[in-house]
Amino acid sequence: KAGVTQTPRYLIKTRGQQVTLSCSPISGHRSVSWYQQTPGQGLQFLFEYFSETQRNKGNFPGRFSGRQFSNSRSEMNVSTLELGDSALYLCASSSVSGETQYFGPGTRLLVL
Amino acid sequence: SQQGEEDPQALSIQEGENATMNCSYKTSINNLQWYRQNSGRGLVHLILIRSNEREKHSGRLRVTLDTSKKSSSLLITASRAADTASYFCATDVGDYKLSFGAGTTVTVRA
């Protein structure tokens, strides 16, 4: 099976812009989670989707949003970018909750 | 706040030696997972151990879980240069997310 894919892999934006990141889970996986990784805060949970429903959301401002499509692919959007949003954004998928999460290679976002 | 905390923060060992890192957490868990990350890339899943398990093995990896002490350890035996990476523990408490520790950076010297 193909692994979790994320696009784009690298992105440079300026403050105030918005960005959309995409994640395609492993075939058959219905749960998709997003995490932000920064040197200062480490790995932090953003949100989790299962069958197009958000089941949990981390402690992030409303500028961070996401959605999941009927084919389980997911997107996350960050509006009004701030310098502190520069991070590695990781997507993970699993077949069911409580099982192994498989991570994609990440999207590295740099906000200037 | 982070659920898991790894110890030590960094570890440097000679090739062929064993590496042990520990993870402590705060609340009851469903399972605990260990991941490896090379140079800021994606996380690679190593082992999942459930709350009713005490020990699991996978190749050169051995994971233990002590729920009474709320702690886990990861042992890498006969380390290789390719084991140089950051290692993270992550806890699942059944709320559809993983909570990660800050990680242990392991350097294997040739």
Image (tube, coloured by chain):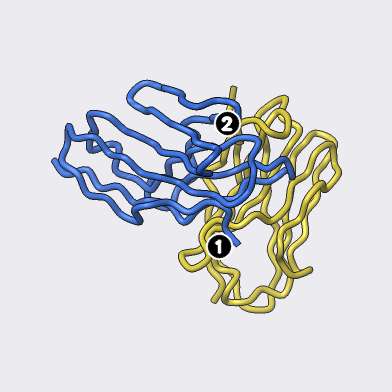
- The residue located at (19%, 35%) in the rendering is B17
**Foreground residue among A36 and B46:** B46
Q: Quadrant of residue A85?
A: bottom right
Using residue A40 as the reference point, say whether residue B105 is left or right of it. Answer: left
Q: Is residue B41 above or below residue B60?
A: below
Using residue B98 as the reference point, say whether residue A31 is left or right of it. Answer: right
Q: How many marks?
A: 2
What chain is the yellow one?
A
Q: Is residue A86 above or below residue A94?
A: below
Q: Chain of mark 1?
A: A
Nearer-N-terminus badge (1/2): 2
Q: Is residue A97 above or below residue A40?
A: above
What chain is the blue one?
B
Residue A109, numbered circle: 1
**Foreground residue among A62 and B57:** B57
Residue A79: x percent and y percent? 74, 69
Q: Is residue A36 visible?
A: yes
Q: Chain of mark 2?
A: A
SS at mark 2 in the image:
loop
Residue A18: x percent and y percent? 71, 68
Q: Quadrant of residue B21?
A: top left
Using residue A14 as the reference point, say whether residue B88 is left or right of it. Answer: left
Q: Is residue A8 visible?
A: no
- The residue located at (34%, 53%) in the rendering is B8
Residue tagged by mark 2? A3
Residue B26: x percent and y percent? 58, 52
